[in-house]
Amino acid sequence: MTDAMPKLFYDGNCPLCEKEICYLNPKLLGKIALIDISEVGFEGWGGVSKQAMMKKIHVWTGQNFLIGLDATLYYWRLAGLSLPAKLLSLPIVYSIANAGYNIWAHWRYRRL
């Protein structure tokens, strides 16, 4: 894959996701493309299906995909939220936050 521009794939129909993207959009402008996967016609990108992207948030870094909490930490850093990202990256905090994200993502996907 040669598309070097980072991309954030998010569900615009998810109220929490949409609220976060609206808040971060000005901070992310020009740093990462925001792709609303709930748009009609979106089927997936880079070999990843829409269904997989609906299960957990995905970021294309320009070289590889990050998924779930790792994706969130990536775009938070791009948005200048270094301190919260650093705190969530601490091993014990990361383990708890990652488990929490996975539970939330599973619950959210089942409600779709």
Image (cartoon, rainbow, N blue to C red):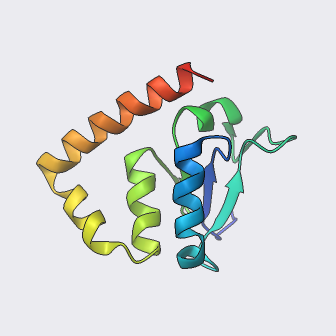
The residue at the far top in this view is 110
Q: Could one spot residue 2 in this view of the protein?
A: yes
* Residue 62 can be seen in this image: no
Question: Picture quarter containing residue 34?
Answer: bottom right
Residue displayed at 51% across by 38% down? 56
Residue 51, position in %: x, y?
66, 29
Instruction: Kindly give the residue lying farthest to the right in the view shown.
Output: 41
Q: Quadrant for the N terminus, please.
A: bottom right
110 left or right, relative to 45: left
Residue furthest to the left: 92
In the picture, residue 29 is in which quadrant?
bottom right
Residue 48: x, y in percent? 65, 39
Q: Which residue is drawn at 46% across and 24% down?
A: 107
Q: Residue at x 45, y 25 (%)?
A: 106
Q: Where is residue 45 in the image (x, y as percent from the top left)?
A: 72, 46
Residue toward you, 68 or 103: 103
- In this figure, what is the number of numbered marks? 0
Q: Which of the pair 43/38 is nearer the observer?
A: 38
Of 92 and 84, nearer the camera is 84
Q: What residue appears at the point 27 percent right and 65 percent down from the top-left corner?
A: 84
Residue 49: % across, % down = 69, 34
Figure quadrant of the C terminus: top right
Asked if residue 85 is positioned above or below residue 66 in the image, the reply reads below
